[in-house]
Amino acid sequence: MKYIDSINNKLIRQTIALYSRHERDKKDLFVLEGERLISELRDTELIEYVIISESYNGYCPDTGNIYLTSNLIFDKLSDTVNPQGILAVCRKLSYDVHSAFTAEAPLFVVLENVQDPGNLGTVIRTADAAGFNGVFLSKGTVDLYNPKVVRSTMGSMFHLPIYTNVNIEHLINDFKRYNVQTLAAHLGGAGTPYECNMKKATAIFIGNEGSGLTPETATMTDRLVRIPMPGKAESINASIAAGILIYEAVRQRLEG
């Protein structure tokens, strides 16, 4: 184990730089902080290196590149208010998009231009809990490897495939090719999700928090569905909308 005694150390500077999306995209790396999240990473070969503080005495992955530093330096590295004292710099996850369609009657969530890190993390956790087969993120969606997104997934980002920077038009064409129906949550929907058959292969589309799905995407999907809102609110949170549709699919499939 090597000791780092300077904030100006090259490895420390590189780690701090990875809090920038530009640097994450350039290096194809991201920061994973905290004992729980690191323990959820099943493929430890993705880990480039680990940095721990002097006071840390919890779980540490079995990797040769472990660096020890002072609590003071680690605090400067951390993106959390109360750091646990361990972080890992990892290579980004990679999946073959066509392998997503091999399951029988798969279920997917597609997010277009969703901007809030908490919303993205919540949708990923919900899709994971519901046993979905994958999540697709459009090019305009908040970065999956944003530290706030990573934390809010609570490790679920490692449990199911998540496809980033997706071209929505190409994706919908793939769905058509593999006979996956596309349902879009939309205020202009004529019917409700409870009228749809989600026992068959289904992709649920959720749009931006403020403007919803783009008109182009809404037009390309098979069906627009409106979540009933008998109250006075004009809309609901994007992650809540996703959760309602996700668990309608679960309800239908549990009924058999």
Image (cartoon, rainbow, N blue to C red):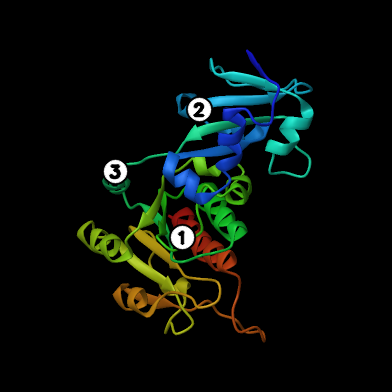
Q: Check residue 99 in the rendering and tell me which mark sits there, or answer none.
A: 3
Label 1: state its secondary structure.
helix
Q: From mark 2 to mark 3, how far is it between C-alphas?
A: 24 Å
Number of residues whose C-alpha sits closer than 10 Å to that of mark 2, classed few (under 14), some (14–19) or many (20 or more): many
The answer for how far apart the CA atoms under marks 1 and 3 are is: 21 Å
Q: Residues within 10 Å of mark 3 (few under 14, many from 20)?
A: few
Residue mark closest to the camera, 2 vs 1: 2
Upstream in the sequence, badge 1 or badge 3?
Answer: 3
Write the residue at 57% across / 42% down: 17
Q: Residues within 10 Å of mark 1 (few under 14, many from 20)?
A: many
Q: Is residue 147 visible?
A: yes
* Residue named by callout 1: 249
Three-letter amino acid code at disc 1? Ala
Q: Position of residue 222 (x, y in %)?
A: 31, 73
Q: Earlier in the sequence, mark 2 or mark 3?
A: 2
| Res 102 quadrant in image | top left
Q: Residue at x 50, y 27 (%)?
A: 47
- Mark 1 near mark 3, Cβ–Cβ under 8 Å? no
- Residue, disc 2: 47
Do the CB atoms of the residues marked 2 and 1 lie less than 8 Å apart?
no
Report the residue at 51% width, 65% height from top. 114
Q: Residue furthest left?
A: 177
Amino acid type at circle 2 is Ile
Look at the image and tell me in which quarter the C terminus lies.
Answer: bottom left
Question: Against 39, is 253 above or below?
Answer: below
Q: Which mark is residue 184?
A: none
Q: Secondary structure at mark 2?
A: strand
Q: Position of residue 172 (x, y in %)?
A: 28, 64
Q: Is residue 53 above or below residue 133?
A: above
How far across and how far down the image is residue 12, in percent? 62, 31
Q: Disc 2 and disc 1: Cα gap in Å? A: 35 Å
